[in-house]
Amino acid sequence: MIYAVWLPLLVPLLAAPLARRGAESLPPRAAAWALTCLALALALSSTAALTLLALDGALRLPFVAALGHLSPNLLGDGSPATAPAAVLAAVALVGLGALVLHRARRHVRELRAVHGQLADHASAGDLTVRQDDGPDAYALPGRPGRIVVTTGMLRALSAPEREVLFAHERAHLAGRHHVFLAAAEFAAALHPALRGLRAPLSYALERWADECAARVTGDRALTARAVGRAALAVSAAGPRPRPRLSLTATAGPVPRRVTALLAPAPTIARTHHLFPRALAALLLACVALSATAALEAATDLHAGIETAQGESAGHGFGDAYGDGDGDGDGDGN
């Protein structure tokens, strides 16, 4: 097990850069799903590997072996790396668990605070207008989800451009894009190499909402102009505080998004080239390798535990029905 268990910890170092490159050749919605699923699969596999490393070391402790009715002699001492790897894995699991819990509580606290603040502002349907000269607009997840826009942003855009902005933010809420962001953030907390997937995922989600807004308005040029003007207004006034899981039309590399909107709509058919397909196959192989290695390590550890338990039970049977020497022949020899 000591060899297979390391693969899920190393695979993200290769898969994350490949995924960033591969996401560029996919339509926005497909890219968002691919990046999120990849991040979750690799994060869960690496966490499982850490758990197996910690468990393998813990089972070799005498009092743990006694609790599990294991034969310490059959388990053996393992390789020289078993003990330090188990200690490091246990420390990492505790730290990662604390980090995930901290981030979850922070997100909940931020969302509750903003929803509470919006109770005193004018609302119409899913739209809440804040009296603020600073231009800002974002999709606020929750129950219910809301589109938050400031009076400064409303003044910065024309009426058709406002409709584009509202369609963009509604696409974030309808697609539950905050779930994608939360999944990627928690995956990054579980494995540092996966932090590199957050930026391309955020870009894919904004492009997904851009395309939805373009379909609703039926005008890609108007959508590009609205996104550009909203981003310029926010840039001139400076960033505004907002919850980390909120999404806004002014986020990410706006020039790239505007350029993409001025081009024809992306389609799956345009991505069927040799390089993207080879890259996708390589990423699938990374996920399969990581998951298979974790499963193989778990199976190996489980088999060792069953063998050690059987050996311990065999000794107990001989002691109970023999004469105490463990061979069960009653002659004491």
Image: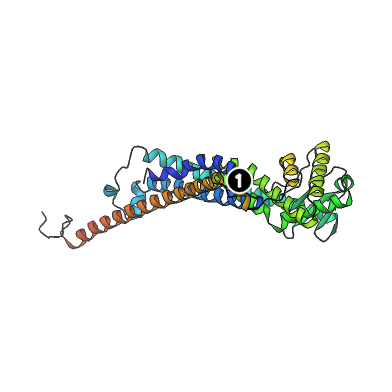
Looking at the image, residue 281 sits to the left or right of residue 268; the answer is left
Residue 2 is left or right of residue 73, and the answer is right
Q: Is residue 57 above or below residue 217?
A: above
Q: Is residue 236 above or below residue 294?
A: above
Quadrant of the rendered structure where residue 171 is?
bottom right
Is the image coloured rainbow, by chain, by secondary structure, or in one colour?
rainbow
Residue 115 visible at all: no
Q: Which residue is mark 1?
A: 23
Instruction: Please tell me which residue lies in front, 154 or 168.
Output: 168
Question: Could you tell me which secondary element the residue under label 1 belongs to?
Answer: helix
> Which residue is depicted at the point 74% across and 57% down?
145
Of 2 and 270, the residue lying toward us: 270
Where residue 25 appears, as percent x and y from the top left, is 61, 45
Which quadrant of the view contains residue 299?
Answer: bottom left
Residue 62 image point, x, y percent: 33, 47
Q: Nearer the viewer, residue 188 or 270?
A: 270
Crowding at mark 1 (Cα within 10 Å: few <14, some 14-19, many 20+) = many
**Residue 311 makes an appearance in the image:** yes
All told, the count of numbered labels is: 1
Residue at 72%, 45% (x, y): give it: 260
Q: Position of residue 312 (x, y in %)?
A: 27, 55
Left or right, residue 262 beside residue 5: right
* Quadrant (top left, top right, bottom left, bottom right) of the C terminus: bottom left
Give above or below for 188 relative to 317. Answer: above
What residue is at 19 percent from the left and 59 percent from the top? Answer: 318
Looking at numbered disc 1 in the image, what kind of residue is underneath it?
Answer: Ala
